[in-house]
């Protein structure tokens, strides 16, 4: 997923309620050989329970009970053979995050972003440092928000299950932390899911959102500024940076941009004629917000759409699409001023093939006395109305004004569309358009035919 002016994109989907009480199929035996970065917590020379290196090299996550909150804690790494002082930095319910005095050299686990849709396993570690693991037969969520989970082991292994046991998927991502054994049966335990961990640790479901900011629109370039009182408010809360979430209201995905610690403004090119919402959130760099806020947006703005572009007597002498193979691109078969071959029809497989690149080909005429730069926004709109954009600049030059030929590779826009449609392109009518300033300068509509 690569659009030049986007730093990250996420699907705006909430699946917790949909997958409530979701059973898993029976898995094969054997667990995995994955390296789980376990540590053994110790207090007053006594083993407290397991913890796992999480998020970065200096944080441990556990549901183990700390007997004496006031006594010093250490974390023993059975792989490195080192013991490091640590202290509890976050505690809520069964969940505890501990900060290591010295960072570990091991690879930390990250939270899973799926609801047990992959093969899953459990693992724990004994006081001797031996890791014991096995397969999970099924998982059942115990509440509509998918916060609590009950797991059934593939084989009875209750003696292995105690607080701090991790549940992970085939990619090594953390799906749940177990908290207790069930009294009934000999193969069942309960725990907290990655969704609940995400909410508690990162405040993903309800982060703070600034209520106001100033905005200036120059053509299709939006400038946001929230210095002053907002910055002071964030500092009082202990936040050390800002994140900006934004979304085209007609799209099913959103974008997050994380700013540098001292930044209190943000620039972004938008598509004329479309409406956007922005959420400006102070956040901790150690635990950044990972999901779009559900709060009211800081700003909602509709970008004005001017009349068709005719400044400088501008007109399109040619405007069409071309489909080139990777071989033609590598060989440089066409120069900057050459007209690319026109394509009049395309199938899904043609455009979806990584061997092919879609190009917008234009030939323009205009009248200028000097070189002038303008913003160039190119968009691809899919049959479902979702819009993908790319931003660059356009140069009007007296040297080319009688026949200004240019073409743009749309591969990144097509790739983004494929990614947002679960790896495939839907058939139907698409539109490629480009804008100079706030004005539409030209568009090409084509139908992508199913096989």
Image (tube, helix red, strand yellow):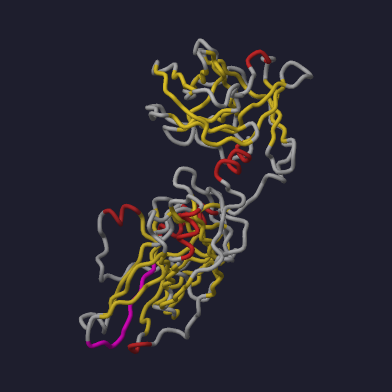
Assign the magenta stretch its main secondary structure. Answer: strand
Numbered circles on residues, count = 0
Among all residues in the image, which is located at the extreme right?
184
Q: Residue furthest top?
A: 128
Relative to the observer, which residue lies in front, 312 or 89? 89
Q: Residue furthest front?
A: 70
Left or right? Give the position of 390 relative to 246.
Answer: left
- Whether residue 350 is visible here, answered yes or no, is no
Asked whether 420 or 10 is in front, the reply is: 10
Could you tell me residue 442's position as x and y percent? 43, 78
Q: Quadrant of residue 137?
A: top right
Image height of 180 relative to 259, above or below: above
Give the residue displayed 45% in from the left and 52% down from the top: 1
Q: Is residue 400 visible?
A: yes
Check the image and report above or below for 158 versus 286.
above
> Which residue sits at x=64%, y=20%?
162
Magenta-tinted stretch: 360-369
Q: Is residue 165 toward the left or the right of residue 396 in the image? A: right
Would you say residue 364 sits in the magenta stretch?
yes
State the image coordinates of residue 112 (x, y, percent, origin top left).
56, 37
Q: Residue shown at 47%/24% (left/top)?
A: 37
Residue 235, image x, y percentages:
46, 55
Q: Position of residue 205 (x, y in %)?
A: 61, 50
Q: Quadrant of the C terminus?
A: bottom right
In magenta stretch: residue 88: no
Quadrant of the image occupied by residue 263? bottom left
147 above or below 271? above
Left/right placement of residue 435 relative to residue 127 reads left
Q: Nearer the viewer, residue 184 or 119?
A: 184
């Amino acid at each position: 997923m690569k659009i030049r002016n986007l730093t990250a994109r996420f699907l705006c989907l909430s699946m917790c309620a949909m997958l409530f009480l979701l059973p898993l199929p029976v898995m094969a035996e054997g667990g995995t050989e994955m390296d789980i970065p376990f540590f053994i917590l110790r207090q007053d020379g006594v083993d407290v329970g397991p913890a796992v290196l999480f998020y970065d090299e200096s944080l441990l996550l556990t549901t183990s009970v700390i007997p004496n909150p006031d006594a010093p804690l250490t974390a023993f790494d059975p792989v490195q053979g080192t013991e490091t002082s640590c202290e509890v930095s976050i505690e809520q319910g069964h969940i505890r995050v501990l900060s290591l005095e010295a960072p570990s050299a091991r690879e930390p686990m990250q939270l899973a972003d799926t609801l047990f849709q992959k093969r899953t396993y459990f693992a724990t570690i004994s006081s001797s440092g031996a890791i014991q693991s096995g397969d999970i037969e099924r998982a059942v969520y115990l509440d509509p928000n998918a916060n609590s989970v009950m797991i059934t082991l593939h084989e009875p292994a209750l003696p292995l299950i105690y607080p701090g046991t991790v549940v992970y998927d085939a990619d090594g991502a953390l799906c749940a932390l177990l908290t207790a054994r069930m009294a009934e049966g000999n193969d069942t335990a309960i725990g907290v899911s990655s969704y609940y961990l995400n909410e508690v640790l990162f405040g993903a479901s309800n982060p703070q959102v600034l209520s106001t900011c100033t905005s200036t629109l120059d053509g299709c370039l939006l400038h946001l500024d929230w210095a002053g009182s907002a910055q002071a408010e964030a500092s009082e809360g202990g936040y050390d940076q800002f994140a900006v979430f934004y979304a085209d209201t007609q799209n099913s995905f959103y974008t997050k941009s994380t700013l540098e610690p001292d930044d209190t403004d943000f620039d972004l090119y938008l598509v004329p004629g479309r409406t956007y919402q922005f959420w400006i959130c102070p956040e901790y760099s150690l635990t950044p917000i990972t999901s779009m806020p559900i709060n009211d947006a800081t700003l909602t703005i509709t970008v004005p759409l001017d009349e068709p572009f005719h400044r400088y007597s501008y007109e399109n002498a040619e405007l069409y699409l071309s489909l080139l193979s990777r071989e033609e691109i590598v060989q440089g078969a066409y120069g900057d001023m050459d007209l690319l071959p026109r394509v009049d029809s395309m199938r899904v497989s043609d455009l979806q093939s990584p061997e092919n690149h879609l190009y917008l080909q234009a030939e323009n005429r205009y009248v200028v006395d000097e070189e002038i730069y303008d913003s160039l926004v190119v968009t691809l709109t899919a049959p479902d109305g979702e819009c993908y954009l790319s931003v660059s600049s356009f140069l009007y030059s007296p040297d080319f004004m009688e026949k200004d030929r240019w073409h743009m590779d749309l591969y990144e826009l097509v790739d983004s569309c494929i990614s947002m449609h679960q790896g495939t392109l839907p058939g139907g009518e698409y539109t490629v358009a480009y804008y100079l300033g706030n004005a539409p300068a030209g568009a090409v509509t084509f139908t992508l035919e199913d096989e």
